[in-house]
Amino acid sequence: MTELDQLLTSGRDAFARRDWTAAERDFREAAGLAPLPADDLAALSDSRWWLGDVPAALAGAEELYRRLTAAGDRTGAGMTAIELALRWGTRGDLAMASGWLSRARRSLEGLAAQPAYGYLRYMEASMTMDFDGDPGQAAGAASELDAQSRSCRDPALACFGRVLSGLALARAGNVDAAFRQLDEAMLPVLAGEVPAEWGGDIYCTVIHLCHSLGDYARMRAWTGALGRWTSGVSSTFVYAHVTRVHELQLLSAEGEWDVVISEIGPLSERLAGAHGWMAGAGFCELGDILRLRGDAAGARRAYARARESGVDPQPGEALLLAAEGRSAEALDCLVRSLGEGSPLDRARLLLSATKTALTAGMPGLAEAYCSELEQTASRYASPGFTAWAAEARARLLLSAGSHTAALEALGTAIRIYRSQRARHGIATAHELLALCRLGLGQGDAAAADRATALAIYRGLGAGPDARRLAGPLPGGLTAREAEVLALVSRGASNRDVAAALVLSEKTVGRHLANIFAKIGVTSRTGAAGWARENRLA
C-alpha cells in the first residue's frame, strides 16, 4: 500500500470514529501528495469545521463545490452549496448564506425529486421566518417536507418538517403544541438519522426559542439534552462551546455571576468567527451582568461586541443610559428596537420600555407598553412573559398609588421568578413589595422585604441596586469597604478582591485594616461572621 493509500485509509477510519484531529492531519498530509477524491475533500472540510478552523473549512467546501460543478455533478454541487449556506448562516453572515442558497437552486434546477430539495426548502423557509417573522410559509413548507420525506425515504426531512411546524406554532402563540412537535423532531436526531451539523443547528434553534420565551425550565431541559448529544459528536468546537454559553445564560439567571464573568467573554470571542449570533448572545449576557454590577465601561464594551456580532444589545444599552439619568435617550433606543422586531422580539423589550417610560414621566406610553406585554404573555402563555407583565403592571400600579393591586401583581411575578430561579428578578420583586407594604402601612413587613432584596443584591454583587437600598452602611463602612468585605466573606483572597474591584493588593490590604478596626474584629473569619450578621455577605 502506498503512503497516499495509507493516509487516506487512516483518515477515513479516523473520520468515521469522529477523531477530527487525526482525520484532519491524515487528509491534509494526503492532499500534499495528490488531489483528494471528492468524498475525502468533504471529510477534510468537515473535520476542520468540527475543530473550529472555520476559514479552512469554508474554503475546502467551496473548492469541493467548484470541483463538483466542473464535473457536472449537479446534485453533489447543490448539496454542497446548501451546506455552505448553513455554515455561513451559523457564522452570522446571512448575505453569504443567501448567496449560496441561490447557487444551490441553480445547481438543482430541473433535476428529479431528491432529498437535496428538502434541505433547500428547509433552509429557505427558516431564513424567511427569521427575516419577516411570518409563520405562514414555514407551516406550508412543513407539509411539503413531510411528503418529501415519505417519497425520498429520508428521515431528516421529516425532522425538518416538524421543526418548521413547531417554530410556526410557537410564533402563532400555540407554545405547548409547538414543543410537542419539536420534541418529536429530535427523535431522528438522537437516532443518528440527521447529519450532525444539521442536528446541532436544530438544538440551538430550539434553545434560542426557549430563551426568547423566558422559559428557563424548558431551556434547562434542552440545554442538558444538547450537552449529552454534543459529547458524542465533538468536544472541540462549535456545539460544545454553544452548550456552555447556554449553560452560562442559565447560571446568570441563577445568580452565579462570578462564574459567568470568568468564562463567557473569552468563550464568545472564540465563537465570534464561527457562530456569530451565539457569540452576540454571550456578549449581551456579559454586558447585562457588568451593567448590574456598576461597570458601565465594561458593559458598553460587551454590548459593542454583541452589535459587531450582529445581535441587537437591547434592552441592555438602553438600561445603561437610563441608569445614567438619560431616560429620553434610553427610550429612543428602545423605540427603535421595538420597531424592528416580531412580537417575540418585542416581548423582551417591553418591561424595560415600561420602566423607562415611567422614569421619563410618560405614564400613557408606559401603559401602552405594559398592555402590549400583557397581551403577548396571554397569547404565548410563557412563564417569563407572564412574570415580566406582572412586574410591569405592578410598577404602573405603584406609580398610581394602588398598593393593594400592585401587591397582587407582584405575587404572580415573584412566584414565577422563584420557579425560574431568576435571582435578580426575585430581588427586584422583593424591593417592589417593600414599597407596596410601606404604602399599606405594613412597616415590619416592608423592612423584611427590603432586607431580603438587599441581601440578594449584595450576594449578586449588584452594587448599584444594593447602594440604592442600603442607606447608611452598618459599622460606618464606606461603600467600597462593604464591597471588599462582601468578597472576603465569600472566601476571596486579597489578590482575588484586587482583580474583581480593579484595585492594587496594597489598597485592598488597607481597606481590610480599616474594616477590622471599624467593626472590632481581628481576623477574616471574624469579619465574615460580622458581615453575615449584618446582611453584608
Image (cartoon, rainbow, N blue to C red):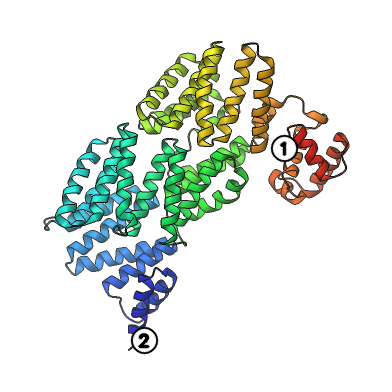
Q: Is residue 272 visible?
A: no
Mark 1 = which residue?
537
Residue 441 on image: x %, y %: 65, 11
Give the camera-side residue of 521 and 141: 521
Q: Position of residue 207 (x, y in %)?
A: 41, 44
Q: Is residue 125 visible?
A: yes
Return the residue nearer the eye: 37 or 300: 37
Q: Dividing the image into 4 quarters, which one contains the C terminus?
A: top right
Q: Quadrant of the N terminus?
A: bottom left
Write down the quadrant of residue 423 in the picture: top right
Location of residue 311 by image quarter: top left
- Identify which amino acid the numbered label 1 is placed on: Ala
Q: Is residue 499 above or below residue 399?
A: below
The residue carrying mark 2 is 3
Neighbour class for label 1 at 10 Å: few (<14), some, many (≥20)?
Answer: many
The three-letter code of the residue at mark 2 reads Glu
Residue at coordinates 71% horizontally, 45% vertically from top-left?
502
